[in-house]
Amino acid sequence: MRVVIIGNGPGGVELAKELSGEHEVLIVEREEVPFYSKPMLSHYIAGFIEREKLFTYSLDWYERKGISLKLGEEAKLIDRARKVLVTDKGEYPYDILVIATGARAREPTVEGKEHLLTLRSIEDAEGIKALLEEHGEALIVGGGFIGLELAGNLAKAGYGVKLIHRRETFLGLDEELSGLIRERLEESGVEFHLSAELLKADENGLLTTRGYVEGKVKICAIGIIPNVEIARRSGIHTGRGILIDDHFRTSAEDVYAIGDCAEYSGIICGTAKAAAGHAKVLANLLRGKEDRYPFELRSSVFKFGDLPIAIIGKTKGEGEWLDEYTKAFFQDGKLVGAVVIGDIRRAFSIEKELKKELYGA
C-alpha cells in the first residue's frame, strides 16, 4: 500500500515512522528542511540550544527508514478521481493520502501590522533571534502557550520582556491559576500589560486600549489558523479545520487528516503532542486495529521558563487543591480535569486516570 503524507510536522513524521516498515511511504513538505521541533523554537531563540539540536531526524534517518521525502515541494491539489496528489513539481499516486499540513500563525489586522513578527517556523525563529540579539528586549502580544513560553524563556535568558494580553486570565484557566503563572513569570522579569487590546503598531512600539507600550522587537502570538487550503481546493469538507470523523476520515474516500489542520466535532487540538497522538492512532486504524484518540480530553504540557505546567481535561468551575502542585476539578463527584504546576509526573498519572474513567483504557 502506498501512503502519501502532506506535511512533515509532528503528525506527518510520526505517521511515516509508524508505517514505513509496513508500507511504501512518501512525505511532501513545502519547507526546505527536514523535521524539526517547533515547541523548542523559543528555547533556540533564547540561546538555550543550538540550531542543530532542533532537528530530531537527519536526512539519513529518512533514507534508512525507507521514507521518501520531497522537500521544497508544495502540494497543490488532490485529484480524487485518479487518486493522485498534484504538486508544483509532479504527481504522486496514492492508496491512502493523509493531510498533515498543520497551521500557521494568526496575523493581526491592525494598522501597522507589518511591524509585527510571528513565530511558527525555523525561518521565523532565526529572524526573531537576530533582532533580539541586536535590541536585547521583546514585546510579545498574546497570553497563549506560545506567548507565555517565549516570554518565560526570553526572561530566563536575560532579555527584557513585556507581554500584552487582552484578558486578565491565561489559557482558559481561572483567576487563581492565571495569577500564579503571572507571579512566577513576573519573578523572572516579565512585565505584564493585561486587559489591553491591540490598536496599532509602529516601529517603536504598540498602541493598546491601556496606553502605548514601547518595544522594537514585537512578536504576535494570538493563535493559529489551520492550513486547510488544499482540502478546500480539492472539494473536501472544511470548517475551521478539515472536518474528520473519529477515525480521521475526511469527506473524501481514502483521504485522512491529522494534527493542527484537522477538526473533529468542533475540536482543533493544536499541539505537537496531540498531532503525534493522532498519528499513532491512525497508524493502528490503517493496520486494521481498533483504536480511538481521546479528542475530548485536553492534555497539554508547557514550560514557561522554569515553570512547568500541565493542563488536563476540563478545568472550568470550582477547583480543589489536592496538594501544593495540583488543582483538581470535579463534576458530580467525579474527577474531570486538573492543572499541575511543577510536578509533571503527577500530571501523567492524572491523565491516565482520566482516560480510564472516560474510555475504559
Image (tube, rainbow, N blue to C red):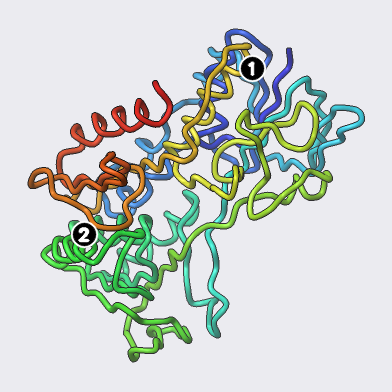
Q: Nearer the viewer, residue 120 or 169?
A: 169
Amino acid at circle 1: Leu
Residue 313, image x, y percentages: 35, 43
Chain-order first, disc 1 or disc 2: 2
On the image, which quarter does residue 132 sit in?
bottom left
Instruction: Please name the amino acid that badge 2 sits on.
Output: Leu
Mark 2 residue element: helix
Crowd class of label 2 (few under 14; some 14 to 19; many from 20; radius 10 Å): some
Seen from the viewer's position, the closer of residues 345 and 13 is: 345
The residue to which callout 1 is attached is: 286
Between disc 1 and disc 2, the foreground one is 2
Q: In the current view of this chain or complex, which residue is farthest to the front?
A: 332
Q: Is residue 131 left or right of residue 108?
A: left
Residue 361 location in percent, x, y?
A: 39, 21
- Where is residue 71 drawn, in percent x and y? 64, 35
Q: How many marks?
A: 2
As drawn, the label of residue 177 is 2
Q: Residue at x 54, y 38 (%)?
A: 33
Most extreme residue toward the right is 81
The residue most toward the top is: 22
* Camera-nearest residue between 160 and 104: 104
Residue 126 horizontal side relative to residue 247, left or right: left
Above or below, 182 against 311 in this view is below
The N terminus, quarter of image: top right
Q: What residue is rendered at 74% in x and 31% in y? A: 255
Percent position of residue 174, x then y: 27, 62
Indicate which disc residue 144 carries.
none
Query: Quick one: SS at disc 1?
Result: helix
For the residues labelled 1 and 2, the Cα–Cα distance comes to 41 Å
Depicted 304 relative to depicted 133: above or below:
above
Residue sitting at 18 percent across and 34 percent down?
Answer: 346
Q: Is residue 262 above or below residue 188?
A: above
